[in-house]
């Protein structure tokens, strides 16, 4: 099924974007990462427009712009919580929440699942508890603030998917271009205000650096690529299937975090992660 392949591929790319963005946020801050990523992602989408095309209609621009507002909040919260860490807990927590939100929307709208789908929802909720619960001494424990931001990021990512699903089938990447343009305008305005405020305070470490900016640009390109794959998948399949497949992205994030940052994953977290992956698979099959 093309939609399933696109969903899995977008999850891999999305997970890579989150890891790179989280690392960049530790160097230059989540606001700057989101702002730089908006520009690099927009550049990629504009370059792809002649190849992909798309109709410039009010619906395409409107839904795209609205998703840009929601996406700005989602990406900022995501990168901010990943910068605090640990990525191995916060990333999957965000993913589970981001899957539940579109599924709930579908149920309210009349979508129905096979019995396995409802079982999967319960398993996903258990996974959220286990992933966030670290009873072992020495295991990395996330702060309440980081957990709250991770849940918030998941809610807004789920809302982003819902809005993206509303875009016209003939709009190509036009909604994503509107998304990135609005995203960039919002984030650069916020960065500008932050710079003005910083002039009244002693210099801090949260500033643009060459390496941090480069990582931020790379995360933006990866994130935009994932969004293109998600949009194509939504048009080839359905919101419920894509939402749970995209929610598999923490696999890539966690592996990179363990290899590059040497973050420790407790046994109970592995159980939670396994349940989250299993729940996503059951929901995709429902």
Image: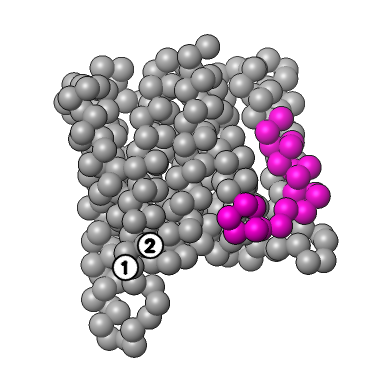
Element under disc 2 = helix
> What is the distance, in whole Å, between disc 2 and disc 1 at their CAs?
7 Å
Classify residue 209 by image quadrant.
bottom left
Query: Is residue 77 shown to the viewer in this render?
Result: no
Which residue lies at the image location 24% right of the left edge and 29% below the top edge? 48
* 259 vs 223, nearest the viewer: 259
The residue stretch that appears in magenta: 258-278
Query: In the image, is 121 to the left or to the right of 230?
Result: right
Mark 1 is surrounded, within 10 Å at the Cα level, by few (under 14), some (14 to 19) or many (20 or more) other residues, namely some
Q: Are marks 2 and 1 in contact (CB under 8 Å)?
A: yes
Return the mark for residue 208.
1
Query: Is residue 179 shown to the viewer in this render?
Result: yes
Which residue lies at the image location 53% right of the left edge and 45% below the top edge? 154
Query: In the image, is 177 to the left or to the right of 78?
Result: left
- How far across and how far down the image is residue 137, in percent? 82, 66
Element under disc 1 = loop
Which residue lies at the image location 65% right of the left edge and 62% below the top edge? 142
Which residue lies at the image location 30% right of the left edge and 43% below the top edge? 41
Classify residue 174 by image quadrant.
top left
* 183 vs 107, nearest the viewer: 183
The type of colouring in the image is one colour
Q: Main secondary structure of the magenta part?
A: helix
Check disc 2 and report the residue beneath it: 212
Return the mark for residue 261.
none
Q: Is residue 272 magenta?
A: yes
């Amino acid at each position: 099924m093309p939609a399933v392949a696109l969903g899995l591929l977008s999850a891999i790319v999305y997970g890579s974007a989150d890891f790179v963005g989280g690392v960049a946020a530790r160097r230059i801050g989540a606001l700057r990462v989101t702002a730089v990523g908006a520009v690099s992602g927009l550049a990629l989408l504009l370059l792809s427009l002649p190849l992909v095309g798309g109709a410039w209609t009010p619906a395409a621009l409107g839904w795209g712009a609205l998703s840009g507002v929601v996406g700005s909040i989602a990406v900022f919260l995501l990168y901010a919580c990943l910068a605090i860490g640990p990525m191995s807990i916060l990333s999957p927590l965000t993913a589970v929440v981001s899957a539940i939100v579109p599924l709930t929307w579908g149920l309210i709208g009349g979508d129905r699942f096979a019995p396995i789908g409802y079982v999967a929802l319960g398993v996903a909720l258990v996974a959220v508890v286990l992933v966030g619960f670290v009873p072992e001494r020495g295991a990395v424990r996330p702060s309440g603030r980081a957990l709250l931001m991770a849940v918030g990021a998941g809610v807004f990512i789920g809302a982003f998917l819902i809005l993206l699903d509303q875009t016209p089938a003939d709009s190509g990447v036009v909604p994503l271009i509107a998304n990135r343009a609005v995203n960039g305008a919002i984030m650069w305005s916020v960065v500008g205000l932050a710079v003005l405020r910083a002039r009244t305070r002693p210099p801090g470490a949260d500033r643009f650096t060459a390496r941090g900016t480069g990582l931020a640009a790379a995360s933006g390109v990866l994130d935009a690529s994932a969004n293109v794959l998600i949009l194509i998948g939504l048009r080839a399949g359905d919101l419920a299937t894509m939402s749970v497949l995209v929610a598999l992205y923490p696999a890539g994030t966690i592996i990179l975090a363990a290899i590059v940052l040497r973050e420790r994953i407790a046994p109970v977290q592995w159980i939670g992660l396994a349940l989250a992956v299993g729940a996503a698979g059951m929901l995709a099959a429902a």
